[in-house]
Amino acid sequence: MTLTGIYRSRRSGTPDSETSSGGGGTAVMRVIVPLQGVVQGHGGLVLGSVIPCAFFYFLQFYLKRNRTDDPEPEPDPAIQNSASSTNNNSGSSSPSQSELNGLARSLSRVIISPRSSGAHVSVSGRANCILKGGDSPGLRRVEEDSYDESGNPDGIIELGLVQNKLSLDVIKDWVSQTSVGLSSSGIASYEPPDGLMELKMGVTRLMSEATKNAVTFDPTQLVLTSGAASAIEILSFCLADSGNAFLVPTPCSPGFDVDVKWRNGLEIIHVPCRSSDNFNISVTALDRSFSQAKKRGVRIRGVIISNPSNPMGSLLTRENLYALLDFTREKNIHIISNEIFASSVHGDEEEAEFVSIAEIADTEENLDKERVHIVYDLSKDLSFPGLRAGAIYSFNENVLAASRKLTAFSPVSSPSQHLLISAISKPEFIQTYIKTNRQRLQRIYSEFVKGLKGLGIECMRSNGGLFCWADMRGLISSYSEKGEIELWNKFLNIGKINVTPGSCCHCIEPGWFRFCFSNLSDKDVLVVMNRIRKVCKSQD
Amino acid sequence: MRLIVPLRGVIQGRGGLFVGSLIPCCLFYFLQLYLKGRRPPPSDPTELPRTSSRSNLFSRGNSIGRVRVSSRAVPVAKPPDSPYYIGLERVKTDPYDRITNTDGIIQLGLAESTLCFDLLQRWMSENLMESIMQSGDGEFDISSIAMYKPFEGLLELRVAFADFMSRIMGGKVSFDPSKMVITAGGTPAIEVLAFCLADHGNAFLIPTPYYPGFERDIKFRTGVELIPVHCRSSDNFTVTVSALEQAFNQARKRGSKVSGILFSNPSNPVGNILSRETLHDILKFAQEKNIHVIYDEIFAGSVYGEKEFVSMAEIADSGDVDKSRVHIIYALSKDLSIPGFRAGVIYSFHEDVVSAAKKLMRFSSVSVPVQRILISLLSDVRFIEEYMTAHRQRIRDKHVRFVEGLKQLGIPCAESGGGLYCWVDMSSLLTSYSEKGELELFEKLLTVAKINATPGTACFCIEPGWFRCCFTALADEDIPVIMDRIRQLAESIRS
């Protein structure tokens, strides 16, 4: 039926079927009416279709212009889940999924109510999204009631925040010795926000040091920012447009959600890795996610990886990196390598070799380097996160030019820059620091892992980073995210330790936890083990 | 057997016009949808130079294409086209120096003050390292500065900041540290506020002439538009509510949503100070339209005229107004002349704005050692008093000298009471009374007279011929040099 219909309409439109023409006599006053042409038989199908289409097009156009603003996209359920699930720590030890949903719903109602009251002025939709997410209640609890060996022995021990307290004495010596350099220089006036050349040279030396001088970094390709978070934010702004996405192998750093999504309006597509592969990144999985996203019409602009990986602490091999680079080349996308723990490698000298992606990129053609970008965190690697100094290293001129300007929003202040210069311009300081820090990391890592093993808890083998990735699948009551959060709550309330559950790192297998051991002294390790034992017992 | 054929219905005469139009429309709609699905995301035509698109084609064969940056990064990466930034760049290539480079370009484009560096230098050499290492109970505890601290600033710093702000505003208003978020300078403060108060595509009303940096601060990433509200020299560039009203209505007609008004007080670049009545009127206007007001009070401590400076916080605290729409930006770069410290503050009466800004500070927080320095600097009341008195006095002196010098050349300035600059009427030097004429003069000032002053165009002033000249980085002996250079230029133009 339909077929014949179309056939007929075609026929009626073709000029040679001009048998039914009746209105030829009105040629004096030819008005172009949609459809009339058909009746008259000349070119009517075209005009008759084009004119309504044009009207429709203009209608759409008009509607588009008059639309006041786009409805806010629904916040990603993953972030909400992780945020709200971790929110539910106090009191209720068994938060159910329905509670979580209820929480989200009540929030959105709050947003509507001020608008209806009229008198109250509302904040932007995107600010509302931020208000909902990104809280870490564990950290807040630690702030309120933090452990102190003598002052508050029942307080909560921090194992969630990634910071290094092992080598603070070295840092202290350095800061107490810098007294002169700071005050005499012109720290007060305007200086380039992307960093002084002197500092950049120091940073590139430090980065080379981490690769055992296998790579020389070019200071003109470096842009300093206030911390790695802003480095990732600026990079993802420069590489992708609103609505585009990045592929991120999981488990990944919990911070990516915030850094990539909040202000840039980008998406993250998680590519799950599994414990059966030792959580290694698989290019096949990346490829699958890429094609799936493409089918959904989402444009992927890059891959974000961490090396040494966070939360597993494993190092990527040369082969891994080559495979990744090949993949990004094939798809013509960017790769951001997050190398913020490059100097915090603690494995055996022979076995644990940190390979920067810059080394791989250096063997490639010029054209191809442009897709490689590195994020570095100077202050984290120097056990000085309070200094807020991170860096973007990129081979792409456009990215560098744009990032330099965007650092106006995330600058490193001049006093911080001069303080850093005074440290990293002294090679002996850097060498002592890296050596001491490595030894101490090594020791505390093996202590910690041994302790867990004594409790029957296995960790992933790790060679870098300030944390270990513990397999607690045997301890959770139900093999699900709910079971994991229950255990997390027990750690916080019964064991009084704050850890990072795998779900925050978007791990798809429940029961994995990240312990950041660099917060601890040797004595603390024993305390932590006792507390974990207590939780284990209560679980039985 | 009724077939719905497009167009045939017309012939048959029943409901055909409707169905006959609807069907092509549907088909067209689906065609659009189909095309949209297959189209790669829109790319800026300027993004890829023609040559590289060719190389793109070539390399397809080897499956290597040149990877592109995002289209929103392209305008950011481009060299700036505002004369404000062009001027600043030009000075860097050939800066004036009293001894070594007497033919260099003199900087009048950057609002920074070197007038009280001697005082700062003294304080820094005495206290800087001590303040970093001091942590209350004597013993230097490195983890108090090395480890993560709340991103919105230490409570101690916020208390000190609040004290300092109320001190420089004459003690008439007190600030609440819990409404405060410390930011890494004024630039991130304004960006974060714009992000929190308006969505992409919304707009702020902004009286012109305004600070050229707002274009970058607000437009680069937040996607918020600025709608100029033109002020004229006949009112000494003071904004009127009727002009605001008009701009608001026009914006609404065009379909853009106005989320707020953005002001500088003391204004930048004119340097005039808004009266209490004007502030009240603006707040009333905002209330009527249910929009936000953002006050940039970054020059609050650099007031040197007769006119009293009134902070919006005072107005908000005084009456029965809805305070939650009032947001204030402040920074230490200008009033304390320490731009290198990158310390600013968002002061907001809206709880949600404060908590969202706190979270966003992970991207622009002030480093902890710098916070320590600031705590001891701002709580050193004796030094602050001494500094503020000297700062005001020295600006006043410099202002008198500079304006007097221009007056002798027959060049008038707008009346001003604050800021590190004056707003100079050089329209008598224009060859044509237009934007083009003004830019020509800007170029002549740069290349012939070797002076970088910011032209009104960069500040979106609608009257041509105005220039912003910052005089607080000059030594007294520089002023005759500048006047000489301007005189020579003026003579060559007028002759």
Image: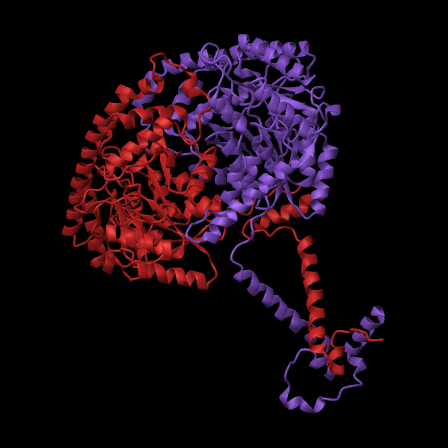
Chain colours: A purple, B red
For the point 68% across and 27% down, which residue is it? A483
Which of the 4 quarters of the picture holds residue B391?
top left
Is residue B97 visible in the rendered image? The answer is: no
The x and y percentages for residue A508 are 69, 30
Q: Residue furthest front?
A: A91
Above/below status of A91 relative to B56:
above
**Nearer to me, A369 or B454:** B454
The x and y percentages for residue A446 are 62, 10
Is residue A414 visible in the rendered image? The answer is: yes
Q: Is A275 left or right of B194, judged from the image as shown?
A: right
Q: Residue furthest bottom?
A: A25
Q: Is B430 left or right of A498, judged from the image as shown?
A: left
Which of the 4 quarters of the picture holds residue A81?
top right
For the point 32% across and 20% down, which residue is it? B131
**Nearer to me, A185 or A413:** A413
Which of the 4 quarters of the picture holds residue A486?
top right
Query: Quarter of the image containing the C terminus of chain B?
Result: bottom left
For the point 65% across and 73% down, which residue is it? A51
- The count of marks equals 0
**Nearer to me, A512 or B384:** A512
Above/below status of A354 relative to A295:
above
Q: Is A11 left or right of B299, judged from the image as shown?
A: right
Query: Quarter of the image containing the N terminus of chain B?
Result: bottom right
The x and y percentages for residue B91 are 33, 41
The x and y percentages for residue A419 are 39, 22
Above/below status of A430 relative to B477:
above
